[in-house]
Image (cartoon, helix red, strand yellow):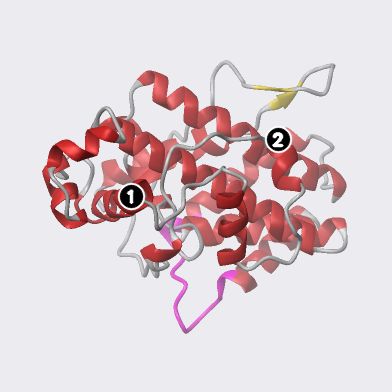
Amino acid sequence: MSFYQALEACQFLSLLLAPARLNAQNTLTLPSKRLVFNHCSQFGEKFIRPLPYADFLGGCSVHKGAASLARLGQNLSPQQLIGALVERGELTDPGSPRGRLLNVAARQFEQKGYARTTVRDIASEVGILSGSIFHHFASKEQILCAVMREVTIFASARMRSAMQQAESPRDKLRACIQSELEAIHGQAVPGFSILVLEWRSLSKDSRKEVLRLRDEYEHIWLIAIRAAKCPGGDAALVRRLLVGALSHTYSWFKPRGKGLSIAELADRILLIFAP
């Protein structure tokens, strides 16, 4: 990964993960200007272990918000969680024509990049004519938006599920930390690298759609930080510091057999933010 790709990665993560603030009515609002990192060291070669694409669900389905995700079961495996989201209409069935198309598109975007992937490439692997894609999507950019939206929805649902399985407030914060680390390092949220590397390929309107979904993700974090009573008394500030700490691990942490595991790294980070 080049320095400029790394810089874009840091900028996207800070845009996606920068905390929204609560107004007087306890309603989440977006900051007018989001923090981006001024410095980013060059990313080294990463050891990434993405999940099989059979476990990734693409599609641009209707999102029903945080309340519906909160009602999902607390002890779901990743496959069960995805299945529950499909049943609720929040993710696309991977076995459907639309789902198969988006699975292929997501994999090709990750492997070749959005710019180098053509509609013809996607159609060829799916086994359909190029024109058939436009029965589902008006453009290649709309496919990219669909993938990003569903990746964000799944990341939020997965972190909420992990937090619900934890018992104490401190354990819930640790669950959030580990969930985000796993997503950043490609171990739990297939397609997350597309969010990072292809952000600038989205249109202005599509970016707004993805950022709206970011609010739910951040709401989960703010609840966990407040409940854990992190030092400082400012949940939004703590979250900004966590954004920097967690996203920057991509430049130096390699989850291999030797050294710290992601779970152990989550334990160390928790000691810093919730001693």
Is residue 4 inside the magenta stretch?
no
Position of 41 compared to 224: left or right?
left
The one of 45 and 94 positioned closer to us in this rendering: 94
In the image, what residue occupies the spot 32% across and 37% down?
143
Marked residue nearer the N-terminal end (2 or 1): 1
Q: Residues within 10 Å of mark 1 (few under 14, many from 20)?
A: some
Amino acid at dot 1? Pro
What's the residue type where badge 2 is placed?
A: Leu
Name the front one of labels 2 and 1. Answer: 1
- Which label is found at residue 97? 1
Residue at (83% x, 42% y) in the render: 226
Question: Where does residue 225 sit, x and y in percent of width and height?
Answer: 78, 45
Whether 258 is among the magenta residues is: yes
Q: Which mark is residue 82?
A: none
Residue at disc 2, secondary structure = helix
Residue 170 horizontal/vertical position (percent)? 83, 58
Residue sitting farthest toward the bottom: 258
Measured as percent of width and height from the top left, residue 52 is found at 39, 68
Q: Which residues are magenta?
A: 249-262
Seen at 21% across and 55% down, the residue is 126
**Vertical relation: 122 (above or below) 164:** above
The residue that disc 2 covers is: 237
Please name whichever residue, 224 or 247, is drawn nearer the observer in this view of the structure: 224
Between 198 and 123, the one lying in front of the other is 123
